């Protein structure tokens, strides 16, 4: 059983989530319902998209901290287009194109100009936020049309058009990364760029594509954000990129690249969103939210790390024939064997 949890971060998260649900359900029976599940899924959409895009970049051993600003800029372009009388489909196209261009600019600097990703995206974090504030004059964009809000309206069973789109995108990302050659190239580039290059993998193109994918995901998150709340504040997306990085770490995505899964990120997002929703349901004061969510996040990571240490010790013990009774006995056993061999 421990072997399963050591190899699979998703299994650890599901176990902890089940325990958390059981505890919350005991304290507040009304929490365990279909309505709560639909709220959790709906509330997770924006973070899901940002985390999914962030994962693409991290897999290639890069980092993108500008996703929140891309979300805000794309949402602003969407809102300004709609308030100027542009049709909804064309405004959505402008929104997605904004994210793609922003991601392409990040990718150009990192993949083709050789600028470290953390430096490049720290710069564009401020640049894109500044462009948004210039475009909006620092004002909120309100009175968005009902057609946009209808995209987030409940169609039944807690699902909206945007929920279906996001879940379909998650499924496509899983298929692309696991079942296609180009998707597997993301893992190859993150694992060993030099080796991937020698094997014929277009390393720069893969990195460039990862940043474009991140930008598109961020712009789609901006669309979801605007549709769900019905207006666009000038701080839209602030800080969400750091939460997305934490979600990736929690979901088993290595910051060193080459390791991670869509399933892990999906489960981690649901886990984080469930905790946030539970705190609201239990009427815990809002100023406790970050503290409790951070404590739970650290607890899960420490539990996972501890399980991995135990399993690693057992594997080494089986491999070398050393029983787990402490370092002293291990040294005595090794010494005895050496003496016996010398005879």
Image (tube, rainbow, N blue to C red):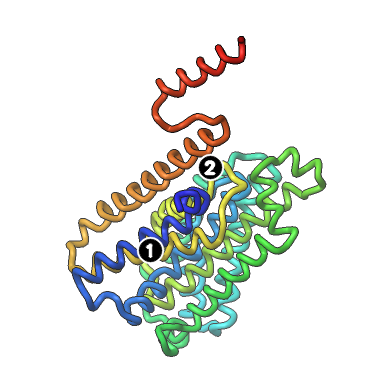
Q: Which is more toward the observer, 95 or 15?
A: 15
Q: Is residue 302 left or right of residue 6?
A: left
Query: Which residue is painted at 46% across and 83% down in the image?
Result: 160
Q: Percent position (x, y) of residue 128?
A: 50, 56
Against 85, residue 18 (above or below) is above
> In the image shown, does 130 or 62 lie closer to the viewer?
62
Residue farthest to the top?
Answer: 343
As drawn, the label of residue 118 is: 2
Q: Is residue 163 above or below residue 220?
A: below
What SS does tag 1 mark? loop
Q: Nearer the viewer, residue 309 or 161?
A: 309
Q: Position of residue 120 (x, y in %)?
A: 56, 44
Q: Is residue 20 visible?
A: yes
* 150 versus 257 height, above or below: below
Among the 4 quarters of the image, the one containing residue 213: bottom right
Kind of element beneath mark 2: helix
Mark 1, residue position: 234
Residue drawn at the location 41% of the way across and 65% of the way down: 270
x then y, percent, for residue 76: 47, 68
């Amino acid at each position: 059983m421990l072997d399963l949890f050591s190899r699979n971060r998703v299994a650890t998260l599901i176990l902890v989530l089940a325990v958390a649900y059981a505890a919350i359900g005991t304290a507040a029976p009304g929490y365990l319902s279909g309505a709560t599940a639909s709220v959790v899924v709906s509330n997770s959409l924006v973070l899901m998209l940002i985390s999914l895009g962030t994962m693409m970049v991290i897999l290639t051993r890069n980092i993108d901290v500008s996703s929140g600003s891309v979300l805000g800029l794309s949402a602003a372009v969407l809102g300004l287009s709609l308030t100027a009388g542009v049709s909804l489909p064309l405004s959505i196209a402008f929104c997605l194109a904004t994210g793609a261009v922003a991601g392409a600019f990040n990718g150009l600097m990192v993949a083709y100009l050789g600028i470290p990703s953390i430096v490049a995206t720290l710069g564009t974090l401020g640049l894109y936020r500044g462009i948004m504030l210039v475009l909006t004059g620092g004002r909120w964009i309100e009175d968005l049309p009902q057609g946009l809000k209808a995209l987030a309206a409940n169609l039944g069973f807690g699902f909206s058009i945007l929920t279906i789109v996001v879940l379909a995108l998650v499924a496509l990302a899983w298929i692309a990364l696991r079942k296609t050659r180009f998707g597997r190239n993301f893992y190859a580039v993150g694992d060993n760029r030099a080796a991937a290059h020698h094997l014929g993998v277009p390393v720069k193109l893969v990195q460039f594509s990862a940043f474009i994918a991140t930008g598109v995901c961020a712009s789609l998150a901006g669309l979801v954000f605007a549709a769900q709340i019905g207006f666009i504040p000038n701080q839209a997306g602030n800080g969400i990129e750091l939460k997305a990085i934490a979600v990736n770490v929690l979901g088993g995505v290595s910051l060193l690249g080459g390791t991670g899964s869509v399933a892990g990120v999906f489960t981690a997002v649901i886990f984080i969103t469930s905790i946030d929703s539970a705190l609201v349901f239990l009427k815990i004061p809002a100023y406790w939210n970050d503290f409790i969510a951070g404590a739970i996040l650290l607890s899960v990571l420490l539990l996972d790390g501890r399980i991995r240490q135990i399993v690693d010790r057992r594997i080494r013990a089986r491999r070398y024939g050393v029983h787990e009774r402490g370092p002293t006995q291990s040294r005595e056993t090794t010494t005895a064997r050496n003496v016996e061999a010398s005879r």
